[in-house]
Protein backbone atom coordinates (compact mmCIF):
# COMPACT_ATOMS: atom_id res chain seq x y z
CA UNK A 1 0.00 0.00 0.00
CA UNK A 2 1.19 3.54 -0.78
CA UNK A 3 0.19 6.93 0.55
CA UNK A 4 -1.60 7.55 -2.72
CA UNK A 5 -3.76 4.49 -1.99
CA UNK A 6 -4.62 5.80 1.49
CA UNK A 7 -5.14 9.41 0.47
CA UNK A 8 -8.24 9.06 -1.68
CA UNK A 9 -10.05 12.40 -1.89
CA UNK A 10 -8.80 13.91 1.36
CA UNK A 11 -8.44 17.65 1.79
CA UNK A 12 -4.90 18.98 1.71
CA UNK A 13 -3.63 20.29 5.03
CA UNK A 14 -1.00 22.99 5.31
CA UNK A 15 0.74 24.45 8.33
CA UNK A 16 0.79 28.21 7.93
CA UNK A 17 2.05 29.07 11.42
CA UNK A 18 5.62 29.91 12.40
CA UNK A 19 7.74 26.81 12.92
CA UNK A 20 10.37 25.71 15.40
CA UNK A 21 14.07 26.02 14.60
CA UNK A 22 15.23 22.90 12.79
CA UNK A 23 18.44 22.22 10.90
CA UNK A 24 16.55 20.66 8.00
CA UNK A 25 12.76 20.47 8.18
CA UNK A 26 10.60 22.82 10.29
CA UNK A 27 8.43 20.87 12.74
CA UNK A 28 5.76 21.71 15.30
CA UNK A 29 4.01 19.78 18.08
CA UNK A 30 0.40 18.67 17.47
CA UNK A 31 -2.05 16.96 19.82
CA UNK A 32 -3.82 13.88 18.46
CA UNK A 33 -6.93 12.42 20.07
CA UNK A 34 -6.92 8.62 20.26
CA UNK A 35 -9.15 5.87 21.60
CA UNK A 36 -8.96 5.57 25.38
CA UNK A 37 -6.30 3.14 26.53
CA UNK A 38 -4.66 2.93 23.09
CA UNK A 39 -2.01 5.63 23.56
CA UNK A 40 1.02 3.29 23.56
CA UNK A 41 -0.29 1.28 20.63
CA UNK A 42 -0.92 4.44 18.59
CA UNK A 43 2.56 5.78 19.39
CA UNK A 44 4.18 2.57 18.15
CA UNK A 45 1.97 2.42 15.05
CA UNK A 46 2.66 6.05 14.05
CA UNK A 47 6.41 5.46 14.39
CA UNK A 48 6.15 2.27 12.33
CA UNK A 49 3.97 3.90 9.63
CA UNK A 50 6.33 6.88 9.40
CA UNK A 51 9.11 4.44 8.43
CA UNK A 52 6.88 2.43 6.09
CA UNK A 53 5.71 5.48 4.16
CA UNK A 54 9.14 7.13 4.18
CA UNK A 55 8.16 10.25 6.14
CA UNK A 56 10.19 9.54 9.30
CA UNK A 57 12.27 12.69 8.84
CA UNK A 58 9.03 14.73 8.86
CA UNK A 59 7.48 12.89 11.83
CA UNK A 60 10.29 13.51 14.27
CA UNK A 61 8.84 12.40 17.64
CA UNK A 62 5.74 10.84 19.16
CA UNK A 63 5.31 11.30 22.90
CA UNK A 64 2.86 10.34 25.66
CA UNK A 65 3.47 12.93 28.42
CA UNK A 66 3.57 11.17 31.80
CA UNK A 67 4.33 12.14 35.38
CA UNK A 68 5.73 9.89 38.12
CA UNK A 69 3.25 8.31 40.52
CA UNK A 70 3.35 5.97 43.49
CA UNK A 71 0.56 3.43 43.89
CA UNK A 72 -0.13 2.09 47.37
CA UNK A 73 -0.97 -1.62 47.27
CA UNK A 74 -3.35 -3.27 49.72
CA UNK A 75 -0.42 -4.65 51.71
CA UNK A 76 0.95 -1.13 52.13
CA UNK A 77 3.87 -1.59 49.73
CA UNK A 78 4.57 1.06 47.12
CA UNK A 79 4.67 0.56 43.36
CA UNK A 80 6.43 3.24 41.32
CA UNK A 81 4.57 3.89 38.09
CA UNK A 82 3.68 6.69 35.68
CA UNK A 83 0.42 8.52 35.08
CA UNK A 84 -0.62 10.02 31.75
CA UNK A 85 -0.91 13.82 31.79
CA UNK A 86 -3.55 13.78 29.02
CA UNK A 87 -5.30 10.40 28.83
CA UNK A 88 -6.67 9.83 25.33
CA UNK A 89 -4.04 11.98 23.58
CA UNK A 90 -0.57 11.64 22.10
CA UNK A 91 1.70 14.46 20.99
CA UNK A 92 3.37 14.34 17.58
CA UNK A 93 6.26 16.60 16.50
CA UNK A 94 5.98 16.81 12.74
CA UNK A 95 6.16 18.87 9.61
CA UNK A 96 2.49 19.16 8.67
CA UNK A 97 1.80 18.36 5.04
CA UNK A 98 -0.66 16.16 3.20
CA UNK A 99 1.50 13.02 3.43
CA UNK A 100 2.30 13.26 7.16
CA UNK A 101 -1.32 14.18 7.92
CA UNK A 102 -2.46 11.01 6.16
CA UNK A 103 0.05 8.82 7.98
CA UNK A 104 -1.10 10.02 11.40
CA UNK A 105 -4.83 10.42 10.69
CA UNK A 106 -5.17 6.94 9.16
CA UNK A 107 -3.35 5.19 12.01
CA UNK A 108 -5.66 2.68 13.76
CA UNK A 109 -7.35 4.06 16.91
CA UNK A 110 -6.61 7.69 15.97
CA UNK A 111 -9.75 9.83 16.21
CA UNK A 112 -8.47 13.17 14.92
CA UNK A 113 -6.02 15.98 15.31
CA UNK A 114 -6.90 18.70 17.79
CA UNK A 115 -7.63 21.79 15.76
CA UNK A 116 -10.17 24.14 14.25
CA UNK A 117 -13.22 22.66 12.57
CA UNK A 118 -13.85 23.99 9.10
CA UNK A 119 -17.52 23.48 8.33
CA UNK A 120 -18.75 22.42 4.95
CA UNK A 121 -20.12 25.16 2.77
CA UNK A 122 -23.17 23.11 1.86
CA UNK A 123 -24.95 20.04 3.12
CA UNK A 124 -25.10 18.49 6.54
CA UNK A 125 -22.47 16.82 8.68
CA UNK A 126 -19.25 17.79 10.34
CA UNK A 127 -16.61 19.60 8.39
CA UNK A 128 -12.89 19.02 8.11
CA UNK A 129 -10.68 19.60 11.16
CA UNK A 130 -7.57 21.64 10.41
CA UNK A 131 -4.78 20.69 12.84
CA UNK A 132 -3.55 23.58 14.97
CA UNK A 133 -0.02 23.40 16.34
CA UNK A 134 0.57 23.79 20.08
CA UNK A 135 2.16 27.05 21.15
CA UNK A 136 5.74 27.07 22.36
CA UNK A 137 4.47 28.00 25.85
CA UNK A 138 2.10 25.01 25.91
CA UNK A 139 4.84 22.60 24.88
CA UNK A 140 7.26 23.99 27.46
CA UNK A 141 4.65 23.76 30.22
CA UNK A 142 3.72 20.16 29.34
CA UNK A 143 7.27 18.81 29.27
CA UNK A 144 8.32 20.82 32.30
CA UNK A 145 5.46 19.17 34.20
CA UNK A 146 6.67 15.69 33.23
CA UNK A 147 10.19 16.31 34.52
CA UNK A 148 9.65 18.48 37.60
CA UNK A 149 6.41 17.30 39.20
CA UNK A 150 6.73 15.39 42.47
CA UNK A 151 5.37 11.83 42.33
CA UNK A 152 1.61 11.66 42.93
CA UNK A 153 0.62 9.08 45.55
CA UNK A 154 -2.41 7.03 44.54
CA UNK A 155 -4.57 4.61 46.55
CA UNK A 156 -7.84 2.95 45.63
CA UNK A 157 -9.64 4.35 48.65
CA UNK A 158 -11.46 7.62 49.35
CA UNK A 159 -13.68 9.29 51.92
CA UNK A 160 -17.04 7.54 52.09
CA UNK A 161 -15.71 4.07 51.23
CA UNK A 162 -16.74 1.20 53.51
CA UNK A 163 -13.86 -0.78 55.01
CA UNK A 164 -13.22 -3.73 57.32
CA UNK A 165 -10.20 -3.85 59.63
CA UNK A 166 -7.93 -6.86 59.00
CA UNK A 167 -5.48 -6.61 61.89
CA UNK A 168 -4.70 -4.82 65.12
CA UNK A 169 -6.91 -4.12 68.15
CA UNK A 170 -9.89 -3.29 65.92
CA UNK A 171 -9.71 -6.44 63.79
CA UNK A 172 -13.07 -7.38 62.16
CA UNK A 173 -14.55 -3.93 62.93
CA UNK A 174 -16.33 -2.30 60.01
CA UNK A 175 -16.42 1.40 59.33
CA UNK A 176 -16.36 4.29 56.86
CA UNK A 177 -13.33 6.21 55.60
CA UNK A 178 -13.41 9.92 56.48
CA UNK A 179 -9.89 10.98 55.49
CA UNK A 180 -7.02 9.52 53.44
CA UNK A 181 -3.36 10.53 53.88
CA UNK A 182 -1.43 8.84 51.04
CA UNK A 183 1.85 10.52 51.94
CA UNK A 184 1.68 8.86 55.39
CA UNK A 185 0.15 5.57 54.16
CA UNK A 186 -2.63 6.05 56.68
CA UNK A 187 -6.35 6.79 56.77
CA UNK A 188 -8.90 7.85 59.34
CA UNK A 189 -12.14 5.88 59.62
CA UNK A 190 -15.23 5.97 61.78
CA UNK A 191 -15.64 2.65 63.58
CA UNK A 192 -18.65 1.76 65.71
CA UNK A 193 -17.11 1.20 69.16
CA UNK A 194 -19.45 0.62 72.11
CA UNK A 195 -22.31 1.81 69.94
CA UNK A 196 -20.67 5.10 69.07
CA UNK A 197 -18.92 6.23 65.87
CA UNK A 198 -15.30 6.74 66.88
CA UNK A 199 -12.55 8.13 64.59
CA UNK A 200 -9.58 5.77 64.41
CA UNK A 201 -6.32 6.14 62.47
CA UNK A 202 -5.26 3.01 60.61
CA UNK A 203 -2.45 1.90 58.32
CA UNK A 204 -3.39 1.15 54.71
CA UNK A 205 -2.33 -2.47 55.16
CA UNK A 206 -4.67 -2.85 58.14
CA UNK A 207 -7.86 -2.39 56.16
CA UNK A 208 -9.68 -3.77 53.17
CA UNK A 209 -12.18 -1.94 51.00
CA UNK A 210 -15.66 -3.46 50.91
CA UNK A 211 -17.89 -3.69 47.88
Image (spheres, rainbow, N blue to C red):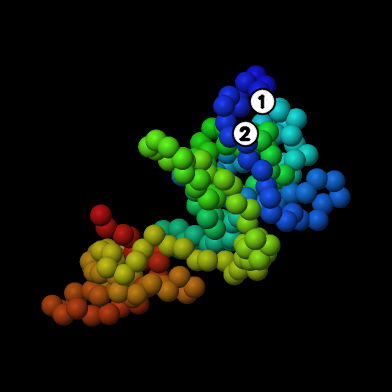
Percent across and percent down for residue 134 are 63, 57
- Where 51 sits versus 67, above or below? above
> What element does badge 1 sit on?
helix
Depth check, front residue: 170 or 133: 133
Q: Does residue 42 show up?
A: yes
- Circle 2 residue: 102
Q: Does residue 63 show up?
A: no
| Residue with the most extreme front position | 122
Depth check, front residue: 157 or 94: 94
Q: Which mark is residue 16?
A: none
Callout 1 touching callout 2 (CB < 8 Å): yes
Q: Quadrant of the C terminus?
A: bottom left
| Displayed quadrant of residue 105 | top right
Residue drawn 78% across the image and 39% down it = 57
Percent across and percent down for residue 110 are 53, 38
Percent across and percent down for residue 101 are 63, 38
- Circle 1 residue: 3
Amino acid sequence: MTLEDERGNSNQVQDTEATENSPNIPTRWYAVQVASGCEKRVKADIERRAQTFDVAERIARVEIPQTPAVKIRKDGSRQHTEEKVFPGYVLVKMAMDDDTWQVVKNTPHVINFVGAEQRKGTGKGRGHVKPVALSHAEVERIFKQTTEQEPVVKIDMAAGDKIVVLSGPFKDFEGEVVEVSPERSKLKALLSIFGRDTPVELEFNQVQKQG
